Image: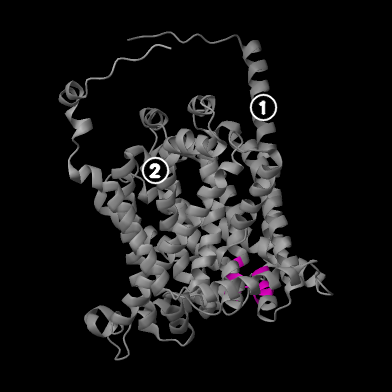
């Protein structure tokens, strides 16, 4: 199959080639400039964060040997040779793990209920007044931006040490995160049913209950389950500041160099997170169809 | 007003049996689920030592704390706080960049269209999953043991935990890439590396850049909290001031964090618009 490729006259070609090279050169220059700015930012950041590559090289062996040590039992054997000895505290740890999951469950539920109560005020199409909307939005933004562990630090002082502070911290943070997501679902809801209900003389509350809620409840539940998944991870570190759960045990093990305990607790946390991820993924797929799983 | 004819309920019942005679299991499913959810909730409240008196006294205490936070006042330590904030931003930037550079080659190994064999892909994916299953704070504690207290441990902690997240996100971006360009390179005689460099990377890099920018933003938040365990930055100051009950300084620090996050949010949104266009910023 012979095809003829037509070649432009040299003069025309030269002009085109010239323009092409110029365009490429301009693009390259832009890229180089961006890369230079980025590199400069990295160097400044490196100085700011006291990065010391020599420390890293000297101590990188420590990182490797740290994992070597946490995988070694007190008697010098590898941990998996004696699982009973490795997970010697499994009864205590399972109890704390259950507490961790319970903290995230109760926290997520409180957060979801509060978000449910607030989100209609934050959504553009259902809010009774712009002022109320502004206030609720800023409130949610605040609850979302302050990390839950900071709330936990403050709550530990106000409510005392213990899981209650952790639950409330997770609840506040979840209210902020879910409130935003919920109000976005409401903003995407169809407004025709609302008009229909309002035309019967219903109050604002009835409009929300009978026209909006049936459209959005599936989305709410899906997001709440997703949040529960995230909260299990967060609850696992609440113990670092004394707010309950398995984190307390982990931080003690790390600080006191109980090496094999560190790996055992980490393994239990990772496995739990896996199981919760898979279960909620399956549940969401089952409840809300495949597209909600993403 | 005309009266509607009275519906013949018997005929309706025979016509739509599944509406009128739903099996008990279907009718009871939702209430039972709600009841179970509430039972677990009630048990949780009991098991986690919730009590109304504790709640009330705690809320009163919280009210006092909030009152004492006003007005936010840094005292004489404003320069310290500003440099701590700079440290936090540095930690976020460096950690995310490091993670992105490390994750790019590994994500290729986890992508289905590059490594077709599930036997090779599976361990890489599980490895990334387990890294992601461990919280950044835990990584910070581990790195403090290795390189000592300070912001450097924070950089490494963010780098490691983001490495897991990026590995997954990047490999998903690579799997979503169009195959035609790759086939074009192969048709013109390119090697496997050429295919990746000229077929895949031009498609994938803008997506990756967008994700990295988003993570720099979210890591500004993470970087504030890893200070709580001693890995430098503004979180260290915050945790200290909370412990010594200097509430005006605490509120000032929280305000600083909120403003910094908002500014970074704004900048990275602008940059993402510039890199991948409005369409892809979801």
User: How far across and how far down the image is residue B40, in percent?
Assistant: 34, 63
Determine which of the numbered discs, if any, sits on residue B89 in the image: none
* Mark closest to the chain's N terminus, 1 or 2: 1
Determine which of the numbered discs, if any, sits on residue A23 in the image: 1
User: How far across and how far down the image is residue A54, in percent?
Assistant: 60, 74
Chain for mark 2?
A: A
Determine which of the numbered discs, if any, sits on residue A294 in the image: 2
State which region is magenta.
B225-239
Query: Is any atom of residue A101 visible in this view?
Result: no
User: Considering the numbered disc 1 on the image, is that residue within a helix, a strand or a loop?
Assistant: helix
From the image, which quarter does the N terminus of chain B lie in? top left
Q: Nearer the viewer, residue A95 or B271?
A: A95
Mark 1 burial class by Cα count in 10 Å: few <14, some 14-19, many 20+ = few
Left or right: where does residue B167 sit relative to residue A160? left
Task: Return the residue found at the far left.
Answer: B14
**Vertical placement of residue A104 versus A294, above or below:** below
Distance from label 1 to label 2 (Cα)? 40 Å
Left or right: where does residue A251 sit relative to residue A152? left
User: Considering the numbered disc 2 on the image, is that residue within a helix, a strand or a loop?
Assistant: loop
Chain for mark 1?
A: A
**Vertical placement of residue B5 versus A83, above or below:** above
Residue B273 lies in what quarter of the image? Answer: top right
Circle 1 or circle 2, nearest the eye = 2
| Residue appearing at x 28%, y 82% in the figure | A86
Residue B219 lies in what quarter of the image? Answer: bottom right
| Residue appearing at x 36%, y 59% in the figure | B38
User: How far across and how far down the image is residue A127, in percent?
Assistant: 62, 38
Task: Find out whether residue B232 is within the magenta segment.
Answer: yes
Residue A152 lies in what quarter of the image? Answer: bottom right
Task: Find out whether residue A163 is within the magenta segment.
Answer: no
Q: Main secondary structure of the magenta part?
A: helix
């Amino acid at each position: 199959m012979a095809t003829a490729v037509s070649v432009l006259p040299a003069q025309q070609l030269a002009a085109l080639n010239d323009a092409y090279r110029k365009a490429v050169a301009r693009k390259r220059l832009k890229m180089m400039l961006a890369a230079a700015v980025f590199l400069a930012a990295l160097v400044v950041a490196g100085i700011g964060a006291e990065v010391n590559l020599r420390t890293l090289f000297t101590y990188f062996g420590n990182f490797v040997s740290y994992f070597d040590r946490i995988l070694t039992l007190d008697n010098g054997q590898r941990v998996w040779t004696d699982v009973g000895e490795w997970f010697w505290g499994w009864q205590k740890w399972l109890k704390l793990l259950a507490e961790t999951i319970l903290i995230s469950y109760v926290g997520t539920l409180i957060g979801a209920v509060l978000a449910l109560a607030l989100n209609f005020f934050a959504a553009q199409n259902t809010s009774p007044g712009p002022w109320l909307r502004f206030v609720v939005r800023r409130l949610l933004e605040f609850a979302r931006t302050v990390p839950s562990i900071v709330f936990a630090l403050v709550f530990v002082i106000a409510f005392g040490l213990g899981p209650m502070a952790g639950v409330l911290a997770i609840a506040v943070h979840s209210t902020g995160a879910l409130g935003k997501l919920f109000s976005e679902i409401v903003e995407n809801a169809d407004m025709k049913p609302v008009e229909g209900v309002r035309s019967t003389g219903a109050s604002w509350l009835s409009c929300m209950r009978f026209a909006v809620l049936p459209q959005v409840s599936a989305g709410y539940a899906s997001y709440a389950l997703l949040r529960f998944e995230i909260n299990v991870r967060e609850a696992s570190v609440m113990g670092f500041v004394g707010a309950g759960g398995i984190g307390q045990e982990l931080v003690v093990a790390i600080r006191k160099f109980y090496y094999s305990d560190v790996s055992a607790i980490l393994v239990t946390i990772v496995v739990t997170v896996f199981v919760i991820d898979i279960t909620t993924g399956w549940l969401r797929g089952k409840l809300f169809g495949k597209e909600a799983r993403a | 007003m005309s009266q509607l004819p009275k519906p013949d309920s018997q005929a309706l019942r025979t016509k739509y049996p599944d509406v009128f005679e739903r099996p008990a299991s279907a009718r009871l499913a939702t209430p039972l689920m709600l009841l179970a959810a509430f039972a677990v909730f009630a048990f949780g409240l009991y098991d986690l030592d919730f009590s109304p008196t504790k709640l009330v006294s705690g809320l009163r205490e919280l009210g006092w704390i909030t009152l004492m936070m006003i007005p936010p006042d840094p005292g004489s330590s404003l320069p310290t706080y500003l440099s701590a904030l700079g440290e936090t931003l540095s930690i976020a930037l460096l950690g995310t960049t490091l993670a992105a550079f490390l994750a790019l080659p590994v994500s290729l190994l986890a992508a289905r269209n590059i490594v077709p064999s599930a036997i090779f892909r599976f361990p890489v994916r599980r490895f990334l999953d387990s890294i992601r299953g461990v919280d950044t704070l835990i990584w910070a504690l581990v790195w403090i043991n290795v390189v000592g207290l300070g912001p450097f441990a924070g950089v490494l902690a963010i780098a490691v935990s983001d490495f897991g997240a990026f590995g997954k996100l990047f490999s998903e971006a690579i799997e979503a890439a169009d195959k035609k360009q790759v086939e074009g390179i192969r048709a013109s005689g390119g090697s496997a590396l050429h295919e990746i460099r000229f077929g895949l990377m031009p498609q994938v890099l803008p997506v990756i850049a967008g994700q990295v920018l988003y993570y720099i933003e979210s890591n500004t938040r993470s970087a504030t909290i890893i200070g709580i365990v001693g890995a430098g930055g503004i979180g260290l100051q915050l945790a200290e001031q909370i412990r010594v009950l200097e509430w005006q300084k605490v509120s000032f620090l929280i305000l600083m964090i909120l403003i910094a996050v908002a500014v970074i949010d704004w900048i990275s949104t602008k940059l993402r618009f510039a890199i991948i266009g409005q369409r892809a910023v979801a």
